[in-house]
């Protein structure tokens, strides 16, 4: 099955009781069982079935299964948000005293979370993405995992997943990748050696910005040991399933950040068109980036699809079918950036990416507000920078919107 066919058919439950073509929303908190013994069996994990939606729910289970097929994993767990997916992914194995080695080019919310984790004794050492020496120098006996985003948001650097996985594995460490901005349409990171992949479903998977959610998928190839990961000691007996089994039986139900059944339903609708949307959005982004790059030489256009991008070669190697749908522009000053944002008529000014509609924002004053100047610079956030999440509009209209805004901007200054 090829990609778009698989999005529609792979992992779908075609035995739905009444023949519903989408798994219905099981909008219930708890599930009745015929006998006390049945309920005991479900709680003990001996019988299939459902007891309580925080633990599992049929709508969520089908969504997880579809994502798992898409990513090529051994198990997926859906969460209340992308941030919850990251939090659960990390704290499933990390203890006080442990360390993360992470690319410094991260989503602002993730940097904030890593700071929160310091209060629990978990330290993050930031390194320049793809810099083998810096990464290896940062690794020590306390390091428990390597972390990066495939396409850094909003830096738009592209991680050489194969090389990073090789570094991680040579030190006996798993590689965790946030693939939200690239999506499985552009790359299945587990195939490139990543061990755990995280997606915020709020973005391209849902596609229409109608529900916050997240999901993580385990590739099942990492050899977990109780010595290095004492949190997994009771689960090592499950072999490759140790990580996902602990998450499912432990933190996922105990931290309580489960996905809502309605969100799982909306995400399944979104998932079916993700390939088509990404194809269109990547093409639109490439056209808009090239247009602005060619027409406005004073603007610094950052897009991995442009040959001028430092990450173009890595992007060509890692991504297929496009270069993502985020473009950033440096326009010379914060004042100009604000003016440009306010002059755009089609693009929505809001804090989100991955919508069908084009979205724009000034990251320095919003999503990266709590980052230090050093963190901002490492994450590719500058005062004169705007981020564009390119939608599925007709690209002529988008180009016209930006042209109109740039003309007004130059008239005003
Ligand atoms: C949005 C985003 C997140 C957080 O996801 P939420 O669903 O908003 O919690 C994490 N990583 C990246 C790269 C994102 O863009």
Image (tube, rainbow, N blue to C red):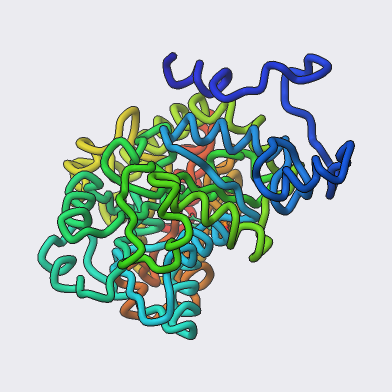
Q: Position of residue 383 (x, y in %)?
A: 39, 72
Residue lying at 10% horizontally and 66% vertically, measured from the top left: 133
Between residue 198 and residue 249, name the one nearer to us: 249
Question: Is 250 placed left or right of 260 in the picture?
Answer: left
Residue 253, compared with residue 113, is above or below; it is above
Residue lying at 50% horizontally and 67% vertically, measured from the top left: 109
Residue 380, compared with residue 203, is above or below; it is below
Asked whether residue 206 is in view, the answer is yes
Asked whether residue 362 is in view, the answer is no
Name the image quarter holding the C terminus.
bottom left
Between residue 43 and residue 292, name the one nearer to us: 43
Looking at the rendering, which quadrant does residue 351 occupy?
Answer: bottom right
Q: Position of residue 250 (x, y in %)?
A: 59, 60
Name the image quarter holding the N terminus.
top left
Residue placed furthest toward the left: 133
Looking at the rendering, which quadrant does residue 387 occupy?
Answer: bottom left
Count of all numbered marks drawn on residues in the image? 0
Q: Position of residue 239 (x, y in %)?
A: 39, 46
Question: Is 143 placed left or right of 199 in the picture?
Answer: left
Residue 43, compared with residue 336, is above or below; it is above
Looking at the rendering, which quadrant does residue 185 occupy?
Answer: top left
Q: Position of residue 386 (x, y in %)?
A: 44, 59
Question: Is 166 placed left or right of 30 in the picture?
Answer: left
Residue lying at 39% horizontally and 44% vertically, measured from the top left: 240
């Amino acid at each position: 099955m090829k990609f778009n066919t698989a999005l529609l058919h792979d992992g779908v439950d075609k035995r739905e009781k009444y023949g519903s073509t989408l798994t219905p929303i099981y909008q219930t908190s708890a599930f009745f069982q015929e006998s006390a013994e049945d309920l005991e069996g479900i709680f003990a994990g001996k019988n299939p079935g459902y007891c309580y939606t925080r633990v599992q729910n049929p709508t969520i289970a089908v969504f997880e299964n579809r994502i798992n097929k898409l990513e090529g994993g051994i198990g997926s767990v859906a969460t209340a948000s992308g941030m919850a997916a990251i939090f659960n992914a990390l704290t499933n194995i990390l203890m006080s005293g442990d360390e993360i080695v992470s690319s410094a080019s991260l989503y602002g919310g993730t940097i904030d979370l890593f700071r929160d984790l310091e209060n629990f004794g978990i330290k993050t050492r930031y390194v320049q993405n793809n810099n083998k020496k810096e990464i290896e120098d940062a690794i020590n006996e306390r390091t428990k995992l390597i972390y990066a985003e495939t396409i850094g948001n909003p830096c738009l650097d592209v991680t050489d997943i194969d090389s990073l996985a090789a570094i991680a594995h040579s030190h006996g460490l798993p590689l965790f990748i946030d693939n939200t901005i690239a999506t499985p349409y552009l790359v299945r990171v587990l195939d490139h050696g990543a061990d755990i992949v995280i997606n915020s479903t709020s973005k391209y998977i849902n596609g229409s910005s109608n529900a916050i959610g997240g999901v993580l998928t385990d590739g099942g190839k990492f050899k977990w040991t109780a010595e290095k990961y004492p949190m997994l000691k009771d689960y090592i007996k499950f072999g490759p399933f140790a990580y996902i089994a602990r998450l499912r039986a432990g933190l996922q139900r105990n931290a309580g950040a489960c996905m809502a059944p309605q969100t799982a339903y909306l995400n399944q609708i979104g998932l079916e068109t993700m390939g088509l949307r990404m194809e269109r959005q990547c093409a639109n982004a490439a056209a808009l980036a090239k247009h602005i790059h060619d027409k406005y030489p004073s603007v610094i256009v950052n897009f991995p699809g442009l040959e001028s991008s430092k990450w173009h070669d890595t992007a060509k190697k890692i991504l297929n079918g496009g270069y993502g749908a985020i473009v950033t522009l440096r326009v010379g000053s914060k004042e100009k950036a604000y003016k440009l944002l306010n002059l755009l008529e089609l693009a929505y000014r809001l804090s989100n990416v991955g919508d069908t509609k084009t979205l724009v924002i000034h990251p320095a004053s919003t999503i990266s507000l709590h980052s230090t100047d050093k963190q901002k610079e490492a994450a590719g956030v500058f005062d004169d920078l705007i981020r564009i999440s390119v939608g599925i509009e007709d690209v002529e209209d988008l180009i016209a919107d930006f042209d109109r805004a740039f003309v007004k901007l130059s008239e005003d200054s």
